[in-house]
Amino acid sequence: MKILYAIQGTGNGHISRAREIVPLLQQYGDVDLLISGTQADVKLTQQVKYQLHGFSFIFGKKGGVNHYETWKEMNLPRFIKDMRSVPLKEYNLILNDFEPVTAWACKRQRIESVGLSHQASFQSKKVPKPKSIDWAQLVMKYYAPASHYVGFHFDRYDDFIYTPVIRAEIRNMIVSNLGHYTVYLPAIDDKFLVPILKQIPHIKWEVFSKHTKVAYTDENVAVQPVNNELFNKSLASCEGLFTGGGFEGPAEALHMGKKLLVAPMKFQYEQQCNAFALKQFGLPVIWGSNRNWLPIVKNWVSNPQEHQFHFPDETAAVIDKVVRQFAR
């Protein structure tokens, strides 16, 4: 059996999930990997056969997407050329983790594909979603269309939705609490964060920033460039994680029993939905409309987190079901 696994390269969640899923897929046949997008800090350990430009959302420094840089990076002629370059008919199964080139190529050629992603869960009307303008929901629906959907979310909201894929390296880590708080906000400049965090001097903060190339310490705040191994160690031994409104990062923190505070990116519908879902569980959120972050952060570090999450290890069973149900 030949399997094509197409992965979105924007953000770290898609790549992190793929690192767990690829070895499982390889038990069923030959797996070719395709990645489009350029904004991930995490890399696959397996060889990538197709590296495409795709459509990437470029992170800004003020809490949202940098729309100008995102627009500048878009290349429609290359997108169409890439759509035609992948020999899709050679594959018995095409899986798509929110990767638009392969998704639209399959749709154009009327080839079945399976959307295997967190975003796939949003096909269900049962998933918590904030009220928003229609175009945001349309982007989520049509960015990477598929014939079938298998989704992951914080809860099993529908019969095709499963709990998050937690990497084995995270499940196997020794969890402790050394009292510090870990921070990863890729769309926020550390120069904005440090002055806020310094106002809570009794807390040690470990900030991982996409916007610095050198490590430095300012009073009780240690800042360093993003490093996956060091971040995992910091997360496993922290009191809590302050991060964006992504999916895999918050899910891993919740799996470890860590306190969680999220600040979803502005104008990023998926992150707004994730934060809205977490809010339903009673977790704190810093919305784009919140001008003064300090009281929210102070309240978060001062109070325990009531809701506890359980994410069973069901990834192998999910992949087995997908292969048996959808392979041609």
Image (cartoon, rainbow, N blue to C red):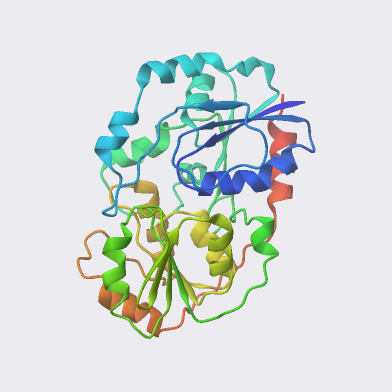
Q: Position of residue 269 (x, y in %)?
A: 35, 47
Q: Is residue 116 above or below residue 171?
A: above
Above or below 77: residue 310: below
- 125 above or below 9? below
In the rendered image, residue 185, in percent from the top left (x then y), is placed at 38, 58
Q: Is residue 290 left or right of residue 274?
A: left
- Visible in this render: residue 87? yes
Q: Nearer the viewer, residue 232 or 260?
A: 232
Q: How many numbered marks have been drawn onto this rendered protein structure?
A: 0
Q: Quadrant of the N terminus?
A: top right
Image check: 313 left or right of 214?
Answer: right
Residue 51: quarter of image:
top right
Q: Name the image quarter holding residue 133.
A: top left
Instruction: Identify the residue at horizontal 68%, vertical 31% (top origin).
Output: 326
Q: Name the image quarter holding residue 45.
A: top right
In the foreground, 108 or 222: 222
Tell me where residue 198 appears, x and y as whole percent: 31, 76
Is residue 156 visible in this depiction of the protein? no
The residue lying at 69 percent from left, 40 percent from top is 22
Q: Residue at x 48, y 44 (%)?
A: 40
Question: The C terminus lies in which quarter of the figure?
Answer: top right
Q: Is residue 137 left or right of residue 35?
A: left
40 or 96: which is nearer to us? Answer: 40
Q: Position of residue 98 (x, y in %)?
A: 50, 37
Residue at 67 percent of width and 58 percent of height: 169
